Image: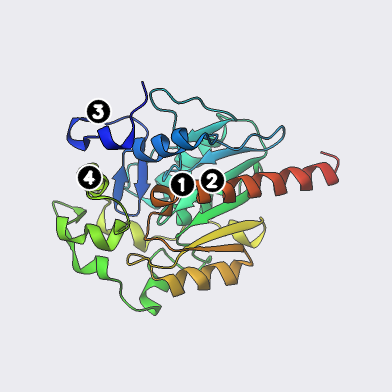
Amino acid sequence: MTFGLPTIRPELLPLPKSRFLLHNVEINIRVATVRLERSGKQLCPRSAESFVVLRAPAILRVDRGAHLLGECIASQHGLNSTAEDVAVTKATIGRVSSPVILVGHSYGGSVITGAGTDDRVAGLVYIAALAPDADETSQTQQSNFPKTDVFSHIDVKDGRIWLLPEGIDSFAGDLPENEKKLVLATQGAPKPDLFEARVGGTAWKSKPSWYIVGKNDRTVHPDLERFFAKRMGATTYELDSSHVPMLSQPERVLDVIRAAANAVRGRSAAAGQ
């Protein structure tokens, strides 16, 4: 069964096991899936040699009525510690064929930076994401750029960080109201010290990278995103989006992932692998 966007009622949707993990918000991915179904796009890049591990935040997951083309998987995380999240991502890599492309959004960029040092990883795709260096944490460079609006709308309570309702426009301001409610209702809350740990590796120093900048991002500063992209020498794309381009512009994001997969396949072919 495939839902058209006008019929979506977030309050009635079951929460699937696979979700988006977005910095401090977890998102049911049905909306992006429906948009791509309606456009006729494939949900994962097809490649004979390279496959995508969609690091939570996963870009796309199979949902009702959807058909997965290619080999994709989303790793799941507790947001308790960066070391734990990196370990889970490395374990998830073993569930698909290699070489692998890791895709990370927001805090997920820190995780793929650590997990991407695995020999099975051939490339990295960052979506409005953090990308710390070896001596940095997820928070280090954020402190060197202007504070974004979203940090005025969070609540630290019961050992977790929560996004308040009035902060949703700072996080996902380019989504329709019903989708914003869905983002807010399915948020996952990280431990406050999650962003203070080093990630245990710097994959972007040795692996080809692609970076999507959200030009209207009010969660991770766009200039910080540009700094990360330039520092890693990434192939960079800029979209007129909030912090969640994979929800507001899923086709554009998917095109970038396909470009990364094709580039990795080309390098593998040239190397005779």
Q: CA distance from mark 3 to mark 1?
A: 21 Å
**Which residue has dot 3 on it?**
14
- Look at discs 3 and 1 and give the one toward the viewer: 1
Quadrant of the image containing the N terminus: top left
For residue 254, the mark is: 2
Of labels 2 and 4, earlier in sequence is 4
Cα gap from disc 3 to disc 2, whole angstroms:
25 Å
> As drawn, is 120 to the left or to the right of 250?
right
Could you tell me residue 19's position as x and y percent? Answer: 35, 38
Q: Secondary structure at mark 3?
A: loop
Per the rendering, the mark at residue 178 is 4
- Tell me which amino acid carries mark 2: Leu
**Rendered residue at 67%/38% (across/down):** 50
In this rendered view, identify the residue nearer to me: 98 or 59. Answer: 59
User: Callout 2 environment at 10 Å: few (<14), some (14 to 19), or many (20+)?
Assistant: many
* Disc on res. 172: none
Residue sitting at 39 percent across and 51 percent down? 248
- Residue at point 37% right, 59% down? 243
Q: Spatial distance from mark 2 to mark 1, Cα to Cα?
A: 6 Å
Q: Amino acid at mark 4?
A: Asn
Tell which circle, 3 or 2, labels the residue nearer the N-terminal end.
Answer: 3
* Whether residue 255 is situated above or below residue 96 in the rendered picture: below
